Amino acid sequence: MILDVIQRIETDAQPPEAADVVIIGGGIAGVTATLFLAEAGLKVVLCEKGVVGGEQSSRNWGWVRQMGRDPVELPLTMGSLDIWRGLDKRFGIDTGFRETGITYVCRTPREVKEFADWADLADRIGMASERLDPAGLARKLPGIAKDYFKFGLHTSNDGRAEPWRAVPQMAMAARKLGAVIVENCAVRGVETSAGHLSEVVTEKGVIRTERAILAGGAWSRMFLGNKGVNFPQLKLHGTVARVEIDGDAGDMPVGGGDFSFRKRLDGGYTVARRNWNVASITPDSFRLLNTYLPTLMSSWREIQIRLNGEFMKEVSMPRKWGLDTPGVFEANRTLDPQPMDNYNRHALKNLARAFPVFKTAKLTHTWAGMIDATPDAIPAIGPVSEVPGLFLSSGYSGHGFGSGPGGGQLVSDLVRGVTPTFDPAPFSLERFKKKGLRPGGAA
């Protein structure tokens, strides 16, 4: 479904022989880095093995929020939201961004405590978040079921955008600024000379460069593993649907403990079962078990462990390869997992209880995507010390659509060697080594 509706753009047929910076991956992290580097006047080339925005960047919910984020990530998220607000005017594009506000609604004592605690944080940092009692929820959300929820938290300056068009629009802007963007151009790996990055090897030729950014999403761990770098990243399978309703549920995204919805510019609603993602058991699940065990213990309600075909599929994938022949990235142009229909049914059933206007919702489309997750759910943005000249921007853990522009700004600052817009320390890849991961350990 996704590739049928995602906005397609004109791209370049071949990469040049040399560039100031090469971007590996055409999702929101890679495209925003390309955009800001091109705006700064650098000769930038982006190589995407499939199509721009073809994986999780077009498959997410479309929320652009700061509310509920980890305090460590919050400065990046807030700064990213500021970037979102000015992107369309700044570059003459239409990402579909709207500052609609976002509301979370809470029914159980655990949910109430989670967002009440976060509201206290919002107070301390001066964020525009408003606590809502049942009467306040009824005023803010006229279609909400009466007396069903006990508490709500509303942040007026959060918003939403359209995943199917936002990243392609940013890529169009980058090309207008001189960036070269090549689709169906898998990067097989990088080469070094005298201990420093010197070439990026693609299926369409070699690009000479001393700087590259890996923004490979769910593929980043495999890519780095071929260089002996252990990036502790796993994949989560998330399912989403589009529905149409007779009536109106408002323009503002709303999330509850077991549902979420967002108004779309095409008139429908994107819905999902909140806090339900599938973690398929793969060989990496065992390699990284000790690293992820604390996360699994604290988030067991939100992660569904499944043994399915992904295990054998990944067993058959090589973990080391040469760069002179077609490899795993050419063979897997687009991660396109099957949607989980039972998850969509659960989401609609829960949503209809909370907002009766959805009781007669007509499901029109379903899709799924693979979320690149880290053990602490914080992205890794910064230099890869084992490969000088290579930078990483990955592991956004389901926050990438909202935080992507901030991440693109940060990594572009680091590549250029200018004072970073955001503190890079919380996002350093080195933090995983401090927690006991050896660079070449389990990659």
Image (spheres, rainbow, N blue to C red):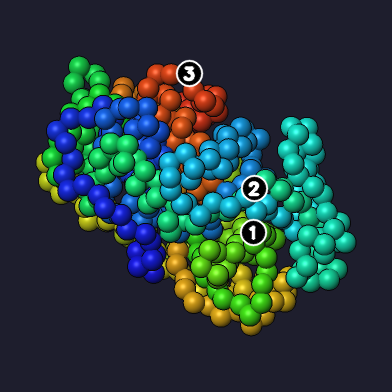
Residues packed near mark 3 inside 10 Å, few (<14), some (14 to 19) or many (20 plus):
few
Residue that numbered label 2 is attached to: 158
Residues packed near mark 1 inside 10 Å, few (<14), some (14 to 19) or many (20 plus):
many
Q: Between 430 and 196, which is closer to the camera in this rendering?
A: 196
Question: What x and y, as percent, mark residue 273?
Answer: 60, 65
Element on which disc 2 rests: loop
Residue located at (23% from left, 42% from top): 187
Q: Is residue 194 above or below residue 220?
A: above
Q: Is residue 60 above or below residue 199?
A: below
Q: Between 9 and 351, which is closer to the camera in this rendering?
A: 9
- Which kind of residue does numbered mark 3 sit on? Thr
| For residue 113, side relative to residue 176 (left or right) | right
Q: Which mark is residue 253?
A: 1
Residues packed near mark 2 inside 10 Å, few (<14), some (14 to 19) or many (20 plus):
many
Q: Tell me the distance, in whole angstroms, between the alpha carbons under discs 2 and 1.
A: 9 Å
Residue located at (50% from left, 74% from top): 341
Q: Tell me the distance, in whole angstroms, between the alpha carbons under discs 3 and 2.
A: 27 Å
Residue that numbered label 3 is attached to: 419
Q: Between 49 and 252, which is closer to the camera in this rendering?
A: 252
Question: What x and y, as percent, mark residue 356?
Answer: 72, 76
- Which kind of residue does numbered mark 2 sit on? Asp
Cβ–Cβ under 8 Å for marks 2 and 1? yes
Question: What x and y, as percent, mark residue 346?
Answer: 61, 72
Q: Tell me the distance, in whole angstroms, between the alpha carbons under discs 3 and 1.
A: 35 Å
Asked which quadrant contains residue 100, the reply is bottom right
Asked which quadrant contains residue 344, the reply is bottom right
Q: In the rendered image, which quarter contains the C terminus?
A: top left
Q: In the rendered image, which quarter contains the N terminus?
A: bottom left
Residue 65 seen in render: yes
Element on which disc 1 rests: loop
- Which kind of residue does numbered mark 1 sit on? Pro
